[in-house]
Image (cartoon, rainbow, N blue to C red):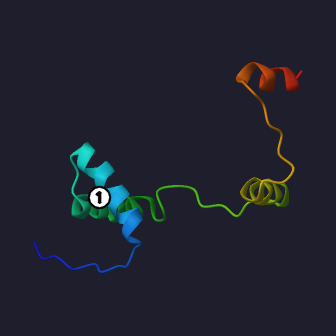
Amino acid sequence: MKTAAVHSRIEPEVKAKAESILQRLGVSPTEAIRMFYTQITLRNGLPFSVDIPNETTEKAMNDSRTGRNLDHFENVDDLMKSWE
């Protein structure tokens, strides 16, 4: 079977973390890329959802990143009580 090379650039920290996970799964980076490409071809698209967040979700994400408009709770019970 003929093969083709795929070359890409990725941040070293992301690469190291991903390869550590793959190693625990017993999957080589090459096998993972092959699986990813195979799923793209089988699904005729990415094998996961990629959505643009709506305005409310985008605001919540920005607030979370900047630490604005967040409620803080000491424990899960206090969080649950806030929903009542």
Is residue 26 positioned above or below 81 on the image? below
Image coords of residue 42 (percent x, y): 38, 59
Q: Quadrant of residue 12?
A: bottom left
Image coords of residue 30 (percent x, y): 23, 64
Which of 18/73 is in front?
73
User: Outermost residue, front direction?
Assistant: 74
- Which residue appears at 36% of the width and 57% of the height? 18
Image coords of residue 1 (percent x, y): 10, 71
Direction from residue 62 to residue 69 in the image, left or right: right
Is residue 84 positioned above or below 48 on the image? above
- Which residue appears at 60% of the width and 61% of the height? 50
User: Outermost residue, right direction?
Assistant: 84
Image coords of residue 54 (percent x, y): 79, 59
User: Looking at numbered disc 1 in the image, what kind of residue is underneath it?
Assistant: Ala
Is residue 72 positioned above or below 74 on the image? below
- Which residue appears at 30% of the width and 64% of the height? 33
User: Outermost residue, left direction?
Assistant: 1
- Which residue appears at 33% of the width and 61% of the height? 16
Direction from residue 25 to residue 81 in the image, left or right: right
Q: What element carries label 1?
A: helix
Direction from residue 46 to residue 30 in the image, left or right: left
**Which residue, given by chain and number where applicable, does mark 1 sit on?**
32
Direction from residue 66 to residue 12 in the image, left or right: left
Viewport quadrant of the C terminus: top right
Which of 63/45 is in front?
63
